[in-house]
Image: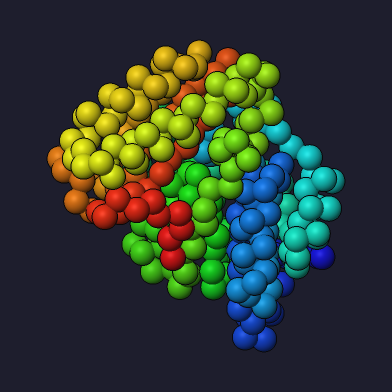
Amino acid sequence: MKIIKTPQNMQEYMLNIRKQHKKIGFVPTMGYFHEGHTSLMAKAREENDLVVTSIFVNPLQFGPSEDFETYPRNEERDCAIAEQFGVDILFIPRTEDMYPNELSISMQVQKRAGVLCGRSRPGHFDGVVVVLAKLFNLILPDNVYFGMKDAQQVAVVKGLIDDFNFPIKLIGMPTVREKNGLAKSSRNVYLNQEEQKEALWLYKALLHAHQLIVDGEKNPNVIIKEVKSIVTTNTSAIIDYVELLNYPALEPVQQIDSLVIVAIAAKFKQARLIDNILIDKDGNIVNSLQ
């Protein structure tokens, strides 16, 4: 596995790779790998000649009160895991190399950002699309892989790729869960023992929403109310949001007659967790997008 640390070297190397007509798969991350990340690497390994993974904790997508400084990092461990899962190139740039000067051009997400996590994190997805635009231009991938746990991010990235004509296929992979159903997250390490048990109710509440839809409930307000009730009754978490929207446009719906997302965010003492499920018009759970 080759480790590259500067944007200039990364782009030069990938330009040479492109001349060899190899199919390039890219997994962008902020590091501290768990099974969610490695599932993306494994899928990229299956589908491409060359796999690139980036580790970059992007300051532009953190608000002033968020956990940029304390976000978990372990570069040595991540390098070993990436190599184990068949990554060919690991790109680990420094902040000062990715952003050597104040940006002269800004990017602002106009749609899909003002709901779910974006409502309480103004500017977050602006930072996401800036860094991804840079990474796409440095790495020049054919395929890019994201986990559906952050389905809003996948929707925003799809907008970025479509709007700016990046010649990239977006693949959304199923949320990787613990055996008990809890979605894998780097922030799970912040949960105490009791909170780990309580956090299971986030997914249970989403599965209840699915069952309501299967049973014929079409009113989003009824479904949202029941999901909130389950979480508040069974956990100490403070609900940030529960929303039911169409997907990937992320707009409100009056009736459930198309692909929708039921999504939740809840704050425990030291961790804010998110989870979601996608449900099609026939009531089936959709785990992946291509």
Q: Position of residue 123 (x, y in %)?
A: 42, 36
The image quadrant where one finds the N terminus is bottom right
Q: Position of residue 202 (x, y in %)?
A: 47, 29
Q: Residue furthest bottom?
A: 20
* Apparent side of residue 10 relative to residue 59 in the rendered image (left or right): right
Position of residue 145 relative to residue 185, above or below, is below
Q: Residue furthest left?
A: 254
* Apparent side of residue 87 relative to residue 212 in the rendered image (left or right): right
The image quadrant where one finds the C terminus is bottom left
* Apparent side of residue 53 relative to residue 268 in the rendered image (left or right): right
The reply to whether residue 148 is visible in this rendering is yes
Q: Nearer the viewer, residue 258 or 122?
A: 258
Residue at (16% x, 43% y) in the render: 255
Q: Nearer the viewer, residue 42 or 9?
A: 42
Residue at (62% x, 24% y) in the render: 196
Position of residue 260 relative to residue 10, above or below, is above
Position of residue 232 relative to residue 59, above or below, is above
Q: Nearer the viewer, residue 61 or 258?
A: 258
* Apparent side of residue 151 relative to residue 20 in the rendered image (left or right): left
Position of residue 103 relative to residue 166, above or below, is above
Count of marks overlaid on the render: 0
Q: How is the image coloured?
A: rainbow
The reply to whether residue 6 is visible in this rendering is no
Residue at (47% x, 69% y) in the render: 169
Q: Position of residue 32 (x, y in %)?
A: 71, 42
Place residue 26 in its image quadrant.
bottom right
Q: Position of residue 20 (x, y in %)?
A: 67, 86
Residue at (21% x, 29% y) in the render: 221
